[in-house]
Amino acid sequence: DAGITQSPRHKVTETGTPVTLRCHQTENHRYMYWYRQDPGHGLRLIHYSYGVKDTDKGEVSDGYSVSRSKTEDFLLTLESATSSQTSVYFCAILEVNRDSGYTFGSGTRLTVV
Amino acid sequence: GENVEQHPSTLSVQEGDSAVIKCTYSDSASNYFPWYKQELGKRPQLIIDIRSNVGEKKDQRIAVTLNKTAKHFSLHITETQPEDSAVYFCAASPTGNQFYFGTGTSLTVIP
């Protein structure tokens, strides 16, 4: 699946601590995305990137930051985790050359206690 | 930005019956409409998509229809099987590089 991996797969953290999730791709895709999935809300865009050091906010970006210092890695940081950020986080890439939709990573289940 | 609404949120059908999931969108610039299937504990996966220059597209037991005038599109699954049980998401894209998702439909196929 387009060589996209997320780490960690599961994480439990305490309120107020910083957390970083990693998305890694091996096929040099330009566009990468971070979504969160919550019951009743579907998939909501947090941040996205259209190239190295080029990022932009999505609809639910408050409390999150991202970095993309190299093509293959897109990092999502929760600056000070809150219980409302307990969610499943999916990274996605857009395979422009296939003229198709997103390919998602396997997800990270984050629990903030 | 684009707003996508999806109905119903839950759907139960008998095995062998058809299932229909409907989505509406707000941005007339949207021109690409993918559908994703997400099995329990798995990642969403693309199952079919349609572009705005096409009214209908079929792939075996699944089909998608698009009405640009009314700004709605639908997923049709015929001869449903237990393995069709999953959450289905529709999405719309006005730019080609950012997708807006519906809230999902949980489909249960009863054997």
Image: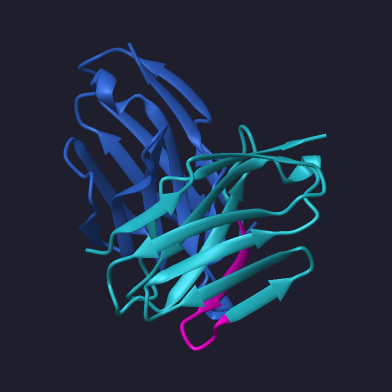
Residue placed at 54% from the left, 79% from the top? A97
x then y, percent, for residue B65:
56, 73
Vertically, is B36 above or below B92? Answer: above
Q: Main secondary structure of the magenta part?
A: strand
Per the image, is B64 magenta? no
Q: Is residue A97 above or below residue B107?
A: below
Residue A15 horizontal/vertical position (percent): 24, 14
Residue drawn at x 28%, y 67% is: B26
Whether residue A3 sits left or right of residue A18 in the image: it is right
* The quadrant where residue B107 appears: top right
Quadrant location of the C terminus of chain B in the rendered image:
top right
Residue B50 lies in the magenta-colored region: yes
Q: Which residue does the image show at 45% across and 48% down from the upper left? A: A91
Q: How many marks?
A: 0
Image height check: is B39 above or below B5? above
The image quadrant of residue B110 is top right
Quadrant into which the N terminus of chain B falls: bottom left
Kindly give the residue lying farthest to the bottom in the view shown.
Answer: B53
Q: Which chain is cyan?
A: B
Q: Out of B84 and A91, give the one closest to the viewer.
A: B84
Observer-nearest of B66 and A94: B66
In the rendered image, what is the letter of the chain coloured blue?
A
Q: Nearer the viewer, residue A8 or A105?
A: A105
- Asked if B72 appears above or below A62 in the picture, the reply is below
Q: Give percent across and percent down for residue A111.
A: 39, 19
Q: Nearer the viewer, residue A26 or A36?
A: A36
Give the residue at x 54% y 86%: B54
Give the residues in magenta.
Answer: B46-55
